[in-house]
Amino acid sequence: MAAGVLVEVVGDRFAAVTTDVACPADAVALRGLTLPGLANAHSHAFHRALRARTHTPGDFFGWREAMYSVAARLDPDSYLALARAVYAEMALAGITCVGEFHYLHRDPAGKPYADPNAMGHAVAQAAREAGIRITVLDTCYLSGGFGAELTGAQIRFSDGDIGGWLGRVSRFDPGAGARLGAAVHSVRAVAPRDIEMVAEWAARGAVLHAHVSEQPAENAGCLAAYGRTPSQVLHQAGALASNLTAVHGTHLSAEDIALYGLNRATVCLCPTTERDLADGIGPGAALAAAGVALSLGSDSHAVIDLFEEARGVELDERLRTETRGHWSAAELLEAATAAGHAALGWPEAGLIAPGALADFVTVALDTPRLAGFQPATAAESAVFAATSADVRHVVVGGAFVVRDGAHQRVDDAPAALHRAILAVA
């Protein structure tokens, strides 16, 4: 940890970073521990409406039906309101960039809106209004499961066929402060020949994300349908490349892990969701040992707290192995910052250095959780003691989005979130 750091911003970027400097009279003093902005690499904004409503005993498929029910109630206006409030909650938690895994494409009857990208524009606009960056991961979703027909709410997730997805996404401009990426929902929802076409589109300069091996049933179904694991299907389709982020990866085989390492791909771990849905503990340590970059996501938003996600990677691994010390605190912060931004196609963010985007978060050190803070263990305090409640200031592109714990652009963000959830839940 460096003390007395002066950061100078020109436009939306850091112009200079100088240590051991007395605070100039015209500078804004940031009292606390200042870190690069946090990147939430995997979000389904509308899942936030399910928090605390689906925690009673029940399996994943019961949770999924509740999720489908919320999806069926959303339109561009209500989704804008909900996503804006969810992204405001993220900003209050120190998140400055989000990857929205977006598959709500059509209306509840499965018909295209007059603007086929109306729902995508809604989430991009929501992020702008909440003051954070976004990568809209436009998701291809064509099947109800290994060739099965789409049913119910799934129908609105689909463009009908791969040509429909390609035609729509190629006309989608998410606007200022937003970037466009591609996603394969899963090997259950997109056939190998169609995965190839999504990967070809993304290879022109976009990031590519996919849900992979979240549950054993997915692996079993994939082996029955194709004789290969989901990762092997992605590999054969040309999708397992350096621009790929596999989300979850909870049940990867040793051979799968080697493929990610060889292809310099990323895996996004979502510990609080994987815990909440009883999916299991992923092979994070084995992935890291294979040279795979790790990023973090809050996924279903059972919790929105990247500090909790970061420590969850280490603490879950301790439970699995009964040993401690798999990652340093600095490595876990890297997953929450630079690695997450890179996975979302923002390599110029996630670090405090001249030329980088001026996105950063200040954690207060005068809270009960940070009592006893010592500069020598600053990273450990951030990862293993801090929570989202300790975030005091958030700056994106050199401008305050959160100041003294209050969102500067969304009035009474908690109340706005409450209203938006009640409108659709």
Image: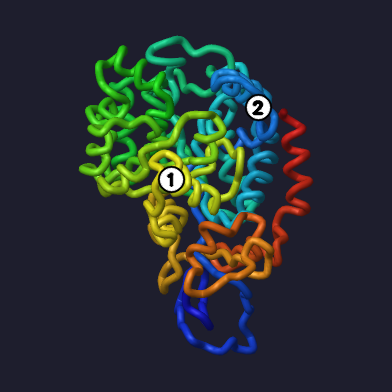
| Residue 109 against residue 261 in the figure, above or below | above
Q: Is residue 292 visible?
A: yes
Residue 111 appearing in the image:
no
Dot 1 crowding, Cα within 10 Å, few <14, some 14–19, many 20+: some
Q: Residues within 10 Å of mark 2 (few under 14, many from 20)?
A: some
- Residue depicted at x 59% and y 39%: 301
Residue 344 relative to residue 360: left or right: left
Please name the residue shown 58% across and 57% down the image. 94
Query: Please, what is the three-letter code of the amino acid marked with disc 1?
Result: Arg
Q: Secondary structure at mark 2?
A: loop
For disc 2, the marked residue is 54
**Point 24% across, 31% down: residue:** 235
Q: Is residue 261 above or below residue 6?
A: above
Left/right of residue 327 with respect to residue 46 in the rendered view: left
Residue at x 40%, y 37% (from the top left corner): 282
Q: Secondary structure at mark 1?
A: helix
Residue 300 location (% of width, % of height): 57, 35
What is the distance, in whole Å, between disc 2 and disc 1 at their CAs? 27 Å
- The spot of residue 396 in percent (x, y) is 56, 62
Instruction: Tell me the quadrant of the picture where the C terminus can be found.
Output: top right
Residue 318, numbered label: 1
Whether 201 is drawn above or below 3: the answer is above
Amino acid at circle 2: Thr
Query: In this orientation, which residue lies closer to the viewer: 116 or 358?
Result: 358
